[in-house]
Image (cartoon, rainbow, N blue to C red):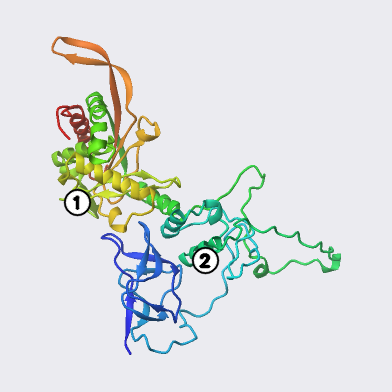
Amino acid sequence: MAEVKMVMPKMGESIMEGTVLNWLKKVGDKIEQDEAVLEVATDKVDTEVPATHAGILKEVLVKEGDVVPVGAPIAVIETDANAAVSAAPAVVAPAAAPAPVVVAPVAVAAEPNTNGFALMAQAVPGRFYSPLVMNMAKEEGVSMAELELIPGTGAEGRVTKKDMLAFVAYKASGASVAPAPVAAPAPVAAPAAAEVMVKPAAETSIAKPAVSVSGAHEIIEMDRMRKMIAQRMVDSKRIAPHVTSFVEADMTKIVNWRNKVKKEFQARENESITFTPIFIEAVVKAIKDYPMINVSVDGDKIIIKKNINIGMAVALPSGNLIVPVIKNADQYNIVGLTKKVNDLARRARENKLTPDDLGDGTFTISNVGSFGNVMGTPIIMQPQVGILALGAIQKKVAVIETEQGDMIGIRQMMFLSHSYDHRVVDGALGGMFVRRVADYLEGFDVTRKI
């Protein structure tokens, strides 16, 4: 009989810890090697952690909600599958008083079906759903309205993989997915004046839906990703003194070239070519000209990055933002960049990014023009020292310089906004860099082949 300790795995170069979201197995369960045992949230993505060995889950060493460093033990697996399984689970920590209910609104379960599964009698909007649950919902055709009726057995009422499987079986049985009506409570006689008393705080700690004093506002809890984004943005503004330089670029050549090749590109590569890979190509060229933009700060030291890893901000359907990274972007041609951009954007919106997709960025771009904005002042992704916002391309009347003299014409113009860390990037470097990006865009070779 042998025992092995399962440790928190490394889930990306820059990830040093993970938060235990949900144990998918309980003490005493038989597990196979590479079978998912728990769900872990990092500051990048949520992911399932597979078992390192086959056997019996003998002991759980960390609780749901614990933040665990990479390499720290999280469970003990008994590798002898024939070993007797103890009925009593191992104790992780001294018993504590149950936490107050935090999921709102409080819902009453409907009548269970023959398999013991019961829907919530009232939907619970605004819950966090892991990428695993969202992918299962998409594959099984489970709507958001149905998700909000599934009782969650995970931490803080989260829906787990087991809950999803139970609901799919419940739905397949032909059972109704509408919540059962909740019976009105029986009237209770008002207590006599002498009987009125204030209950102890412990008895009144059940959280209720947050409401405003006037009733004219709605108060909602930030989801986990929004909390992380908020914290990172505050940290970045605190760490780095931000300065922004602006230039305007003539995008007419690029617009005309893309219009000419996009149908051919779609037919040949089965991919849509957007402006983003063209922007990345220009940024990569400018970084090679000004390598001190591709750096990070460590105390009073400047670390010059040899790899050019370009992050691109992607807006998610939830309204949150995520920044997947194209590693070694200087090693791709325009076709390769297009495929990488499309792949990362697609997987970002489908919650299928891995921690490695989000790490090691050295410079970031944000296409604010996709929202119709003409310019922006983006916040730097730490520990990088620069981020470039690209505005909407708009037709404008402009002066065109020709050999025959200046002329007035209609041109496709775009603003570029470069925010940079003034600790190590002065105005001259920050301004020259964004001007060089614009120069590469304006000098685009319209005769190039794809």
Quadrant of res 3: bottom left
Disc sitting over residue 302 in the figure? 1
Vertical position of residue 319 compared to residue 128: above or below: above
The residue at the point 52 percent across, 52 percent down is 144
Question: Which residue is denoted by mark 2 in the rendering?
Answer: 166
Check disc 2 and give the amino acid type: Ala
Camera-side residue of 164 and 355:
164
Q: Earlier in the sequence, mark 2 or mark 1?
A: 2
Camera-side residue of 46 and 388:
46
Is residue 64 visible in the rendered structure shown here? yes
The residue at the point 55 percent across, 50 percent down is 220
Quadrant of res 56: bottom left
Is 96 placed left or right of 377 in the picture? right
The residue at the point 30 percent across, 72 percent down is 71
Give the structural element (helix, strand or loop) at label 1.
strand
Q: Quadrant of the C terminus?
A: top left
Q: Nearer the viewer, mark 2 or mark 1?
A: 2
Give the structural element (helix, strand or loop) at label 2.
helix
| Neighbourhood count class around disc 1 (C-alpha, 10 Å): few under 14, some 14–19, many 20 upward | few
Vertical position of residue 292 compared to residue 265: above or below: below
Q: Quadrant of the N terminus?
A: bottom left
Q: Give percent across and percent down for residue 180.
A: 67, 59
Is 136 placed left or right of 402 in the picture? right
Check disc 1 and give the amino acid type: Ile
Quadrant of res 409: top left
Is 157 placed left or right of 194 in the picture? left
Is residue 427 visible in the rendered structure shown here? no
Camera-side residue of 243 and 172:
172
Measured Cα–Cα span from mark 2 to mark 1: 53 Å
